[in-house]
Image (tube, rainbow, N blue to C red):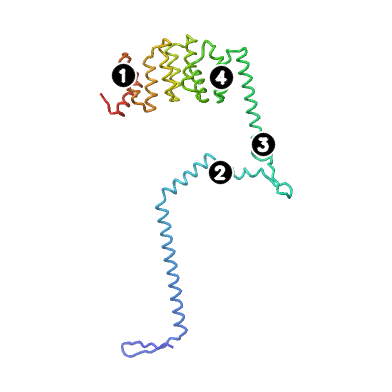
Amino acid sequence: WLKIETTGSDSRYPFTIPPSYCWQDHSCTSTSLRTTTAAKMFTMLMDQVIHIVVSARTELILFCLAFGIHYFMFGNAFARGGSKTAGTRVVGTTGKRRADLSSEGGGCQPRRRVAEASEDASMEEEVTAALAGQPKQLIAVSQTAYERGDHRSVLRCWPGLKKLDQVPASHLAHVVESMQRFKRESSAIVGEVRNFLQRNGDACSVEYINELLESLAKSLDTEVVSGIVRSLPALGVEPDSSTYEVLIQMHFATRSFDSVTELAQTMRTKGIKPTVRASLALLKTALQTASLN
């Protein structure tokens, strides 16, 4: 028993507290302390989590945005990955596996290969027929092959195309691109084009050459384009302002500012006035080289 005396205004009033009450109060105090400590730790942990989330909010937003765009464009990648093994099943108890051709994509590859082989055979027949007795169809057959990405068939048509009187400059550029795809040497490509232009008088005009160069310059193959331009005097073709425009823009795109400056000097020497686009490229070149004058 715990004896406690209290002092009032007139007299003392002693009273006692049972031991069981004192132990119960002490136990309640310990439980309350543990609860308070746990609450504080939880609060601190949540503060840390919130701080991390707030600090990395930009990265989280970008991740969610990238995931959403990927899902929108390509669909569910996990479902596609799981379908690859859906066509495999266990046969018997020996553990052997075989592909189920009826599953998704199981028989697509053979059918696709057969279709591609059939198209190639059809294109070979068309090329052979055009070379044998229908040379006027060569341009259409060659253009179809180019649109299909069949550069080998385009080059097969080239010997017959060289004998034609008229070949569009745009298609001649396609033939040159096919040669580039097959890693032909630049000098060999220039020789083929020069021989074609020499045999076709209608093609030896500055308008035809400019259209050809404009298409070729998009590939930024400066060796081929410059080689064709160097062949123009032998073909009796004089470059004009449009020719120099194509050359200036090509060299500016490749950041060959020295070549652009040389072309500008040549134009001034010959008295050729640059076009609007050529003048803009020359101005940008001057700003890049800090040589405004």
26 versus 60 height, above or below: below
* Position of residue 214 measured from the top left corner of the image (x, y, whole percent): 43, 20
Badge number at residue 77: 2
Which SS class for mark 2? Answer: helix
**Residue at the spot of label 4:** 142
Q: Nearer the viewer, mark 4 or mark 1?
A: 1
Dot 2 amino acid type:
Ala
Q: Kindly identify the residue that appears in the image at 66 percent across and 29 percent down.
A: 114
N-term-proximal mark, 2 vs 4: 2
Which SS class for mark 1? Answer: helix
Disc 3 and disc 4: Cα gap in Å? 32 Å
**Residue at the spot of label 1:** 265
Question: Label 4: few (<14), some or many (≥20) within 10 Å?
Answer: many
Disc 3 and disc 2: Cα gap in Å? 21 Å
Q: Are marks 2 and 4 in contact (CB under 8 Å)?
A: no
Question: Label 2: few (<14), some or many (≥20) within 10 Å?
Answer: few
Dot 1 amino acid type:
Gln
**Residue at the spot of label 3:** 107
